[in-house]
Amino acid sequence: MIIDFHTHIFEDSLAPRAVEALTAGAKGLFFPLHNMKLCDLLEKMDEAGIDKSVVQPVVTKRKQVEKVNTWAAGIVSDRISSFGGIFPNEDDWKEQIDFVCSLGLPGIKFHCEFQDFVIDSPRMLKIYDYAFEKGLIIIHHAGYDPAFTEPFRSSPKQFAHIMEELKGGVMVAAHFGGERQWEDVEKYLAGSDIYLDTSMGFGIYGKEVFTEIYKKHGADRILFATDSPWSDARKELEIFKEIPMNEEDRNKILSGNAERILGLRGGN
């Protein structure tokens, strides 16, 4: 079984505008490989042999919270899981988290650049703590994003600070802990309790960087992910399957860890 823990789609009527805006933000460095509708994601999953994908919506305005989360809950199926989203800069963040929980969504996606917050601020620590109390998983964009300029609002050192402050709960740092920050990922995060997803991806950091961090971090907290539509799932899988590791570890990364934290039957 293969689970892609990090994908992006939009409600059909919004997808064309989202594709246009996100492509412009990528500044010619990255191009979407599908049109960011549910049907496109399912087609790409079939082409790559992916059994289940986890959609990660990003809420950029408070008024989007109810609509985005209701849509997210509505696309859930045997092949699609979806996280929810909140807009953390408003004072009603507890009510927003409660709404995500009421829909049965397993976690919250944060993007500190699009949502304009520093990941380890005291306010955000309170938000994470409440989300963990509610049993939610938290996933963060981590590191470089071509639509924004340095200094970025997240770093492996900041993620390490969060993990020191908050005990318990599942937090995932996407892009293998920090896009283009992998020396610091190895320094500050390898071997910690944080989960790393592989999104965006093996074609960028390559086999050597992955292997060094994997050896120090272990397989139990690594999640296969693509950031679809921003990378080619077939190529990502081809590269991953070439990396030497035992089959138990490979299966944990491809699906077992995701099954476990999502509460799916059969998780290792």
Image (cartoon, grey):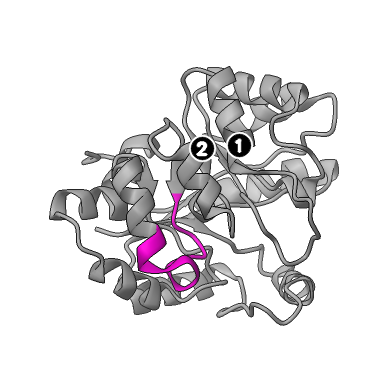
The residue that appears at 30% across and 40% down in the rendered structure is 220
Nearest the viewer among 215 and 18 is 215
| Label whose residue precedes the other's in the sequence (1 or 2) | 1
At label 1, the amino acid type is Lys
Could you say whether the residue bearing mark 1 is in a helix, strand or loop?
helix
Q: Main secondary structure of the magenta part?
A: helix
Locate residue 154, reporting x and y percent: 68, 43
Q: Is residue 262 above or below residue 176?
A: above
Examine the rendering and report whether any part of residue 79 can be seen.
Answer: no
Q: Is residue 204 magenta?
A: yes
Q: Which residue is tagged 2?
A: 188
Q: Is residue 101 magenta?
A: no
- Quarter of the image with the N terminus in it: bottom left
Q: Is residue 97 above or below residue 244?
A: above
Image quadrant of residue 119? top right
Locate residue 185, reporting x and y percent: 51, 46
Image quadrant of residue 159? top right
Q: Which residue is tagged 1?
A: 157
Q: Residues within 10 Å of mark 2 (few under 14, many from 20)?
A: some
At label 2, the amino acid type is Tyr
The residue that appears at 79% across and 39% down in the rendered structure is 117
Magenta residues? 197-209
Examine the rendering and report whether any part of residue 56 can be seen.
Answer: yes
Locate residue 150, reporting x and y percent: 79, 56
Locate residue 39, reporting x and y percent: 51, 73
Task: Compute the Cα span from label 1 to label 2.
Answer: 6 Å
Q: In screen coordinates, is 9 left or right of 167?
A: right
